[in-house]
Image (spheres, grey):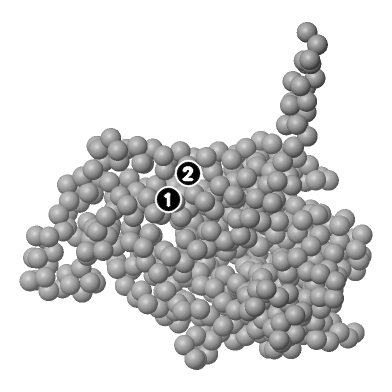
Amino acid sequence: MTKVGEDHLNSLRDGREIYLDGERVADPTTHPAYRNSCGVAASLYDFQSRSDNLELMTFEGGVNGNRVNRCWQLPTNYEELVRRREALMAWATVHYGFMGRSPDHVASCFSGMVMGIEVFEQYDKKRAGALRDYFDYARNNDLFLSYVIINPQADRSKSASEQADPFLAAGVVDEDAAGLTIRGAKMLATSGIMANELFVTCLHPLQKGEERYAVSFAIPINASGLKILSRKSYEKQSPIRFDNPLSNQFDENDAVIYFDDVKVPWDRVFVNQNVEMTAKQAFATPAHYYQNYQCMIRLSVKLRFLLGIAHRIAETNGVISFPQVREILGQMAADATLIEGMLYAMEVRGNHVGPYFVPNRHMLYSALVLAQQLYPKMIATMREIAGGGVIMLPSSVSDFASPMLRDLINKTQKSPFYEPEERVKFFKLAWDAIGSEFASRHTQYEMFYAAPTFVNKGHSFRTFDWKGSTDLVERLMNSYSLQP
């Protein structure tokens, strides 16, 4: 039986501790701050279970042959990798690329870790067994996983162990026969409010003496003592879809997670207080680049959507025939196509890790570097094309209810492409994509979701075939000398 939207909504009514505006949220699926975004998450499962999508979106990977999303598929060849990407790309079109932590992201992370299971086995066979069993459990139930892998910023000149409170960052406070007890905070639980479980670890490098933070485990969102401290809800501030069509639906939210002495049983612990293995789980396995490959799939859909808005802005303002505007749009199209082309190149230049076929690492890290630069540039260019038209709009949909105001709207909201009402509707969408608080969060998110750009440039440096390049230089230099 394939998971459907109602299954997911029911799973979120589990007593999880969400706090917003000083109060506890009883049910995120009905609360005005989260209900629409929870509905979008549910719609992903309805999309995959449709009879016309079932073969594209799912495979027989669950228990007793149950069909689950292809995000859990472990490709063994190029064709299977492409088929999986086609499913993830179709899923991203449901939210137009605006859900950065859709269910396929952390599923890709776990898939990458399982592809490198021998790394865990060399570390600890029991922890490797826990990881393998958890992957089977999450896949069989088609779970929506989020993660928290970053420590609170606090004093960034100091490491986690040097902070005034040694348990500011989540760490092990106790260990016994039943498991670990975790105390402290982690961020950034993007989509955590609408997920089933959290993967908790530390992506930042740790040093000797910081073993208590060097853990890796999974925990249900409703675990006793786990508190979700939500940021401001853009959805709650955008109750009318006409006025904020993106904020109203696709605010996946972000949250700080506080572990108030949360008990984690051993069968959910994958790394226990080991600095070296905490780093290896991401970078000695395909996990880090496999999860970011999913990000590039999502981003390619989002960039295509933004290109559509940019083109429509030019049409709405009557400047689409201007040579300089076409030049700008052509550059934007080239930039977006560069990312999409690199996505396909990752697959074509993919390689085997054991029995599994994975995308090329260097192509992935190169795409990350370029994407982090490209996104804010694209947003700035779209704002330049739009001018003041995206600001000077009716205050809300309520203005249309007044005959006098509607008449004035019809007189002032002119366009060679749209009638006044459609012009207002479109420019409100455009502003929500490029200028609203929701849009600003997305610009910040796309700039840092895969770590600061200097980190990704470092990954690009480490994974490039420098020997191949320097060998070319040496070959030419060896072909001549001082002697004729």
The residue tagged 2 is 336
Residue 412, percent across and down? 12, 60
Q: Secondary structure at mark 1?
A: helix
What is the three-letter code of the residue carrying label 1?
A: Met
Q: Residues within 10 Å of mark 2 (few under 14, many from 20)?
A: many
Nearest the eye: 459 or 200: 459
Residue 260 vertical placement versus 462 (above, below): below
Q: Secondary structure at mark 2?
A: helix
The residue tagged 1 is 378
Nearest the eye: 225 or 10: 225
- Residue at x-position 33% and y-position 58%: 430
Nearest the eye: 419 or 386: 386
Q: CA distance from mark 1 to mark 2?
A: 9 Å
Residue 339 vertical placement versus 140 (above, below): above
Residue 77, percent across and down? 73, 40
Residue 30 vertical placement versus 428 (above, below): below
Residue 151, percent across and down? 67, 74
